[in-house]
Amino acid sequence: MSEQIVTARNLARHYEVKQGFLSAPATVRALSDVSFDLRPGQTLAVVGESGCGKSTLARLVTMIEEPTGGELRIKGEAVTRDHWASLRSSVQIVFQDPYGSLNPRQRISTILQEPLKINRPDMSAEERDRLAREKLALVGLRPEHYDRFPHMFSGGQRQRISIARALMLDPAILVLDEPISALDVSIQSQILNLLVELQERLGLAYLFISHDLSVVRHFCDDVIVMYLGRVVEQGPSKEVFANPRHPYTKALISATPRAVPGSGRKRIKLQGELPSPMDLIEGCPFAPRCWRVTDQCRKSRPELSGGAHGIACYNPED
Amino acid sequence: MTATAPAQTPANGVERPGRFKEFYHYFSENRGAVFGLWIFAGFVFVAAFAPWLAPYDPAEQFRDFTLIPPAWQEGGNWAFPLGTDPLGRDMLSRLLTGARYSFFVGVVVVTVSATGGIIIGLISAFAPKWLDAIIMRVMDIILAFPSLLLALVLVAILGPSLTNAMIAIAIVAQPHYVRLTRASALGELQKDYVTSARVVGAGLPRLMFLTVLPNCLAPIIVQAALSFSTAILDAAALGFLGMGAQPPTPEWGTMLAEAREFILRAWWVVTFPGLAILITVLSINLMGDGLRDALDPKLKRS
Amino acid sequence: MSLLEVRNLTVEFATSAGQFRAVEGVDVTLDKGEVLAIVGESGSGKSVSMLAVMGLLPWTATITADRMAFEGRDLREITPAERRKIIGKDIAMIFQEPMSSLNPCFTVGFQIKEALRQHLGLDRKARHNRAIELFEQVGIPAPEKRLNVFPHQMSGGMNQRVMIAMAIACNPKVLIADEPTTALDVTIQAQILDLLLELREKNGMALALITHDMGVVAETAERVAVHYAGQKVEEQPVAGLFGRPYHPYTAALLAALPERATSRILPTIPGVVPGQFDRPAGCLFAPRCAHASAICQTRPPLPRGADEGHARCHTPLLPDGKTVAAPIEEVSQ
């Protein structure tokens, strides 16, 4: 196994939220106790429903925000504010919405060259231009697209441009924040294939944030399942999907519709909704919706345990 | 690599319209706007070529021809098509030259107030909460005064002249730009392209002026067009109150003020400057409405 | 007789660059109590065709159809007042964004009671009781309390339940659900889909489900219509469509699903959906089709018979799913 390129230990991000004029500010635990390793060429998926903290994790790894607890190391260096500038070029991000992620007033050439202008100020204009055109070809766009504005492209093409921009600094890690969920079905497979090919060619490590389990199952090596800011199950993707042990993972897999008509399989119906992250839950965060809940679950929170395929549950499924 | 999209060859000859074409399509849907645009173009033309268009020097006094009515009225004289004022100066020449002052006032006020307002607005959008709060409260205070009154006070402090009037009007107009810029910058800040500029390490000035500002320009341009007319109106009002351009400057507001006492005897000395102000301001406002239709995405139809 | 019958529906929008044809020659039939899924990518006209039936399109749209009938009455011939009586009462619709479909200024209770007053003319007390009954029916816990709550105080799933409650308030015969679960999480999506199917059983209403998610289609629909670039390219019962698609587009769409993948590289459909400015002259799918022949480039295909899935294709797929029949020269009309 090659060396780890990202290591995260007990990462946490809490927000203080003011609630009205006089009441004390509440703490939103967007993310608590997340640990993982990522090596070159690996794809790690983070799945969960809205509010589970997966986007917060993306913002921490891309250094948009600082963690409030725990330790994050990229290429062996601790990620602190003074190292941000030097680590920036190692981690880049591709966003979900291809319409919001490109500056509508900039040409593709400007968009692609911007990272170089900022991070490699010594580079000559010709060199920048050459690199930008090279990356444009790499993501499967044609040279004549180079001088156009984003509004002249379809969603899939824009997502290609976003990927090209993320690759401009030759990063080692790409954070993919739901990169295909805003795209049409026929375009999704194009972009997924592009990502697979880029990974094989450039040895990129992917942190793949998604809520679509069928994509994750196909695309990712390892998976982290999150619920309310905490990891509930973590392990190799094949094992987790073949043998989900946390009730939430099981429910999530069962709720994902499959394109097999008349399969007649029973969905596990979860009762209720996600609680607000502001509510302090003493026990297991999933306890209010769980069908295997015991008194122990309501009283204390289970820790993640079990080695390579870890779960945080007192009464796991077999 | 992956299969690329096939060439976007239009099969039925319909081409995607260019940016300007699309802009003009929306603009020209508003008939009043096109009308306003033509009048405004005429105004700009007159302002640019006033010395060559005007038959006489605007300050030249023909003492034998005081208060001559317009040419088509009884007693009129075709040498002075719109008549003369109490000092025997040619009304037409003065009105044409006055366009120059009004245009000048509009351009200067809009440039000064928009530049200042945009910079302060951007700072406010990017600043920490406390600084943002301070800036916005100061702007609220300025906005709490009736604008003409505040301009009057400022001119009273600075001394009456056209330059000081312009400074005063610019200060009064500025908060509108600050609010507008801040609001649309805050909206843009939420978008992913700003985040991705941050992820590649863009510094604050770059984020403010190169990333965010170009995307906030549409409403600011509309505001600039509308405040152009307000500036002309305010300058005329200050001139009328004797706090703006000083006689013998042929500024339209000042002309009105000078002619006030002849209003019953010689209708033309007040009517023509008044009409000039009315038509100019109206045309700019119509044009501004059209700009809003064409530039403001909120009103765009499918 | 079908409940809802639309023949040869075409919708055009006036844009700055001329007419844009969003829907072209679409037929929709919906029988009592059935679940029809309309699948397609963005720009396939799947929502627009249903909005046209509801009469909810903006004035820039021109709607033409040979027939547009509900229970045998042509919707275009009746007066606007009569039409309003049908729309919202007998045909109801729910939308993708439950948050923006509800007015944030009023409590959900007020909004549902308002709908009841408009359509049923019940008195105050009856409205209140009916609202509670509806909330119970769609599975909103503590309905009495929830009536006094504003939309922003509830989750997306709960708001969608409120929307469904409002839609079924008048026991509609047809419920059109436009991407009802796209904005929701998967566990909530499963709840909402189950609820819709349950309501169909109980009230015997027909359900038209507009979606882009093949998984949702497979698990809920009975009949599926596939739309592409404004046309209906195929229509089949659900098992047939997933088992033996006739149109190359349907086949390619199914093959591109990650869960059907056999290797790490997925089969793809090259290119993009044609837009307003690059509409092909022949078959709309021809530029992206692996089986396109010369005739596909020049002549638009007509829908085939029901035995071939109404496929709008010159060369429908043979049973092995890979090869196509030889193009048949159609007699030009």
Image (cartoon, coloured by chain):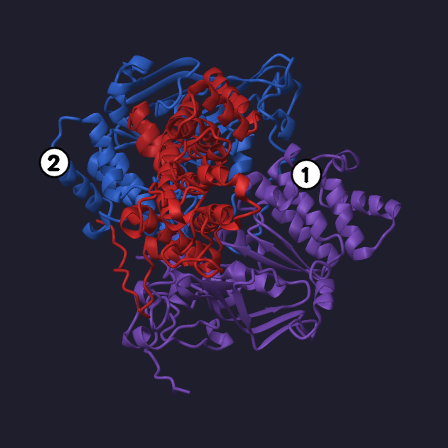
Chain colours: A blue, B red, C purple
A39 and A86: which is toward the camera: A86
Number of the front mark, 1 or 2: 1
Q: In the rendered view, would you say B214 is above or below B164?
A: below
Residue B12 rendering spot, x and y as whole percentages: 33, 70
Circles 1 and 2 on the same chain: no
Task: Give the quadrant of residue C150.
Answer: top right
Answer yes or no: is residue B89 visible: no
Q: Can you identify the residue that label 2 sits on?
A: A127
Q: Nearer the viewer, residue C318 or B43?
A: B43
Q: Given the image, on which type of amino acid does mark 1 rest? A: Cys
Q: Position of residue B269 (x, y in %)?
A: 48, 46
Inspect the image, locate mark 2, and give the three-letter code of the amino acid beneath it.
Answer: Glu
Answer with left or right where residue B273 lies relative to residue A158. Answer: right
Q: Secondary structure at mark 2?
A: helix
Give the total number of marks visible in the rendering: 2
Percent across and percent down for residue A223 are 41, 31
